[in-house]
Image (spheres, rainbow, N blue to C red):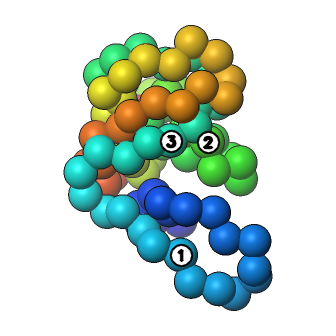
C-alpha cells in the first residue's frame, strides 16, 4: 500500500483518530543503521523506517530522506517527508 505520512503521537485505542504529518520533518524510529540523505521506506509492519534496499528495478513507496543518522535499530532520527514512488 501507499504511505500516507507519519503519525505524530501513539494511539492505543483501536479505531481512534491519530494526527498524520504529510509534509516537513518528522521524528521516526529506525529499523537499523541509516546514513544521512538516504531514501527510506517502512520496515514491514513495525512502523520503523529502513533504507530502501529492495531488489533493483522494484517500485517502492518512499517516505522521504534522512536528515539525521541512525546507528542502530531503535534510534530516533529525523526524516524530511517526500512521499513518492521510486524504482530501487
Image height check: is 58 above or below 7? above
Q: Nearer the viewer, residue 42 or 85?
A: 42
**Which label lies toward us, 3 or 2?**
3
The residue at which mark 3 appears reads as 28
Which tag is nearer the camera, tag 2 or tag 1?
A: 1
Q: Are marks 3 and 2 in contact (CB under 8 Å)?
A: yes
- At horizontal 45% and vertical 73% (from top left) the residue drawn is 19
Task: Please tell me in which quadrant of the rendered image residue 73 appears.
Answer: top right
The residue at which mark 1 appears reads as 18
Residue plotted at (39% across, 34% down)? 78
Foreground of the two, 37 or 76: 76
Question: What is the distance, in whole Å, between disc 3 and disc 2 at their CAs?
Answer: 7 Å
Q: What residue is shown at x 36% (from left), y 63% (from top)?
A: 21
Q: How many marks?
A: 3
Q: Residues within 10 Å of mark 3 (few under 14, many from 20)?
A: some
Q: Position of residue 68 (x, y in %)?
A: 37, 22
Evaluate if marks 1 and 3 touch, with contact meaning CB atoms under 8 Å apart. Answer: no
Q: Quadrant of residue 17?
A: bottom right
Which residue is farthest bottom? 15
State the quadrant of the C terminus: top left
Give the residue at x 55% y 46%.
Answer: 42
**In terms of secondary structure, where does tag 2 sit?**
loop
Q: Quadrant of residue 13?
A: bottom right
* Residue 48, label in figure: 2
Q: Position of residue 5 (x, y in %)?
A: 41, 61
Q: Earlier in the sequence, mark 2 or mark 1?
A: 1
Give the class, few, some or many, for how many residues have Cα within 10 Å of label 1's Cα (few <14, many ≥20). few
Q: Is residue 59 visible?
A: no
Which SS class for mark 3? strand
Q: Is residue 86 left or right of residue 70?
A: left
Q: Is residue 62 above or below residue 38?
A: below
Amino acid at each position: 500500500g501507499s504511505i500516507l505520512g507519519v503519525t505524530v503521537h501513539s494511539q492505543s485505542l483501536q479505531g481512534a483518530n491519530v494526527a498524520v504529518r504529510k509534509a516537513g520533518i518528522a521524528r521516526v524510529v529506525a529499523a537499523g543503521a541509516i546514513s544521512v540523505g538516504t531514501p527510506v521506506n517502512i520496515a514491514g509492519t513495525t512502523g520503523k523506517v529502513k533504507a530502501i534496499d529492495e531488489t533493483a528495478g522494484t517500485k517502492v513507496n518512499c517516505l522521504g530522506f534522512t536528515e539525521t543518522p541512525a546507528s542502530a535499530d531503535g534510534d530516533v532520527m529525523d526524516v524530511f517527508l517526500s512521499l513518492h514512488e521510486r524504482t530501487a
